[in-house]
Image (cartoon, rainbow, N blue to C red):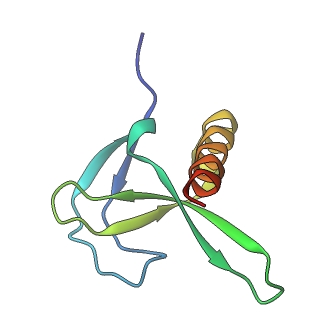
Amino acid sequence: MKRWHLELSCTGKGNDQVGCGLENKIYESDIFVTTDYLIDESIAYFFTFSCPSCGTKTDIKDYVIPKDIRRAKIEEFIYKSVKRR
């Protein structure tokens, strides 16, 4: 069975960083959630990976990640956030 993955460049987009440009195979296990507060004080969720070469964080467009993976990543993030309290 083939593992789901994306091929994405390290750009630093969404994280005010400059990436190295390396093309990476990003698997589900490489993706984590980052957040930001919006003007209305709601939380925006972003799907992010860290470049294995330089460590730069790059956001991934939501629509390229399957819905079930997005949902699982957000649930995992919320669970870990609640557990830390």
Q: Residue at x 21, y 59 (%)?
A: 22
Task: Decide: is 80 above or below 17.
Answer: above
Residue that lies at the very extreme toward the left in this rendered image = 53
Query: Residue 8 location, x and y as percent?
Result: 37, 53
- Quadrant housing residue 65: top right
Q: Is residue 52 left or right of residue 43?
A: left
In the image shown, does 73 or 59 lie closer to the viewer?
73
Q: Residue at x 28, y 69 (%)?
A: 56
Q: Quadrant of the N terminus?
A: top left
Residue that lies at the very extreme toward the top in this rendered image = 1
- Quadrant housing residue 26: top left
Residue that lies at the very extreme toward the right in this rendered image = 40
Query: Residue 79 location, x and y as percent?
Result: 63, 47
Residue that lies at the very extreme toward the front in this rendered image = 85
- Quadrant housing residue 85: bottom right
Query: Residue 71 location, x and y as percent?
Result: 69, 42
Task: Decide: is 21 above or below 78.
Answer: below
In the image shown, does 74 or 61 lie closer to the viewer?
74
Q: Is residue 9 left or right of residue 71?
A: left
Query: Residue 84 location, x and y as percent?
Result: 55, 57
Task: Decide: is 7 above or below 21.
Answer: above
In the image shown, does 75 or 63 lie closer to the viewer?
75
Q: How many marks?
A: 0
Task: Decide: is 5 above or below 81.
Answer: above
